[in-house]
Image: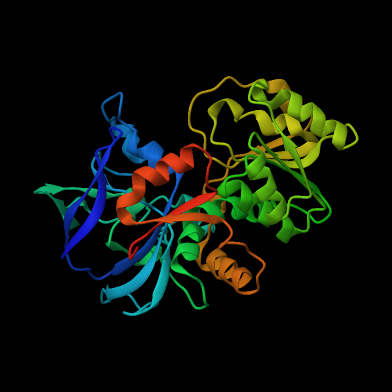
Amino acid sequence: MRIQAIITEGKGSFVLDEVTLQPPQADEVLLEMKASGVCHTDYDCMCMWKDRAPRAEDFLRVGPRSSTYIMGHEGAGIVLQVGENVNHVKPGDRVLLNWAIPCGQCFQCLRSAENICENRRSLPDERFDWRGRKINTSFALGTMATHALVPRQAVVKIDNEISFAEACILGCAVMTGFGSVVNAAKVTPGSTVVVLGCGGVGLSVIQGAVYCGATTILAVDIAAARLDMAMRFGATTTLLADTADRGLQQAALKVRSMTGGRGADYCFECTAIPALGPAPLAFTRSGGTAVGVSGIEQSIPFDMELFEWDKTYLNPLYGQCRPTRDFPLLLKLHSENRLKLREMVTRTYPLDGLSEAFSDMRAGRIAKGVLVMNA
């Protein structure tokens, strides 16, 4: 089957071109894609090998398994064809995709840690052909395309009324932020929560804190427009940070003053800025919990004094997602008007509009951008 897809070689650029897909095998699903979220991770992976050659350890990560691949890991669409072992969806079903694709049998899956499955499902490169070359798909999905061929475990049926643009962002940004609050930190009712960075993930953290019953939700960002949006998503107060505030140390002092000198019960880092990896510890009280949501992977200096006293630092992957538990909950909350998704999708773009979407995202002009395939 010939499709249109956005392909990168990981050197800082991409091309929209024709790719040939093989028919779905026993445990696979073929989809017509309708929407794909645009994420900072997509941009980072596109530039992964811009200044160096790929190393073997690069492909042990959850992103692309080869240096040339179809981009995109947040997607929603319609099932076209299923393999003989697929029984939870059928052709015509509306579905969303998630990149926690558990095998269900390994050590981690059996202890309900499906997000860190040791044998995560993916398809071999031979199933995708681009200009005579075998290629792979981002996070075993490749959602920035007119069609996608994916493992059955990646597919979640949509049973309620929701647009494809709203559904697709559940697959990463919303799950990561909401799950980090609900599943990983287990925020308690009546608590004080600080959120550093109010993009799509940060707004999802705020919504998770509202769901958990946090009393005070303090949003911190360097952009006033994003703080205005944070208030609409459930923040109770905001703090405009200074770009010259190294490590957000001055912001942390202000937050401590606002919390009676103690600090917050929980603080979530959602900036994806490596230098701010330690920052949530400075905002939390003794015995509090700091959470690195954005998945910083670089080596950075860390002042161990920040851990005093009895503080906990969590670094959850994908909000500790368990697909069969979490996505039905998110869809239910949306149907009950308790999860703002339409408001988060600031702008949509056609499939050939990825350059503009990246530009808007990196400039902070949008909370969440989505490629819509029929635009």
> Which of 35 and 117 lies nearest the eye of the viewer?
35
Residue 260 location, quadrant = top right
Residue pictured at 40% horizontal, 75% vertical: 94
Q: Outermost residue, left direction? A: 132
Residue 56 location, quadrant = top left
Q: Outermost residue, right direction? A: 260
Q: Quadrant of the N terminus?
A: bottom left
Residue pictured at 18% horizontal, 57% vertical: 127
Q: Is residue 35 left or right of residue 255?
A: left
Identify whether 202 is placed above or below 246: below
What x and y, as percent, mark residue 238? 75, 42
Q: Is residue 364 left or right of residue 154?
A: right
Image color mode: rainbow
Identify whether 298 is placed above or below 27: above
Q: Is residue 112 left or right of residue 138?
A: right
What x and y, as percent, mark residue 111? 54, 57
Q: Is residue 315 left or right of residue 51?
A: right
What x and y, as percent, mark residue 63? 37, 44
Q: Is residue 142 visible?
A: no
What x and y, as percent, mark residue 190? 84, 54
Q: Quadrant of the C terminus?
A: bottom left
Residue pictured at 28% horizontal, 75% vertical: 80
Q: Can residue 323 be seen in this view?
A: yes
> Which of 288 and 97 lies nearest the eye of the viewer?
97
Identify whether 359 is placed above or below 166: above
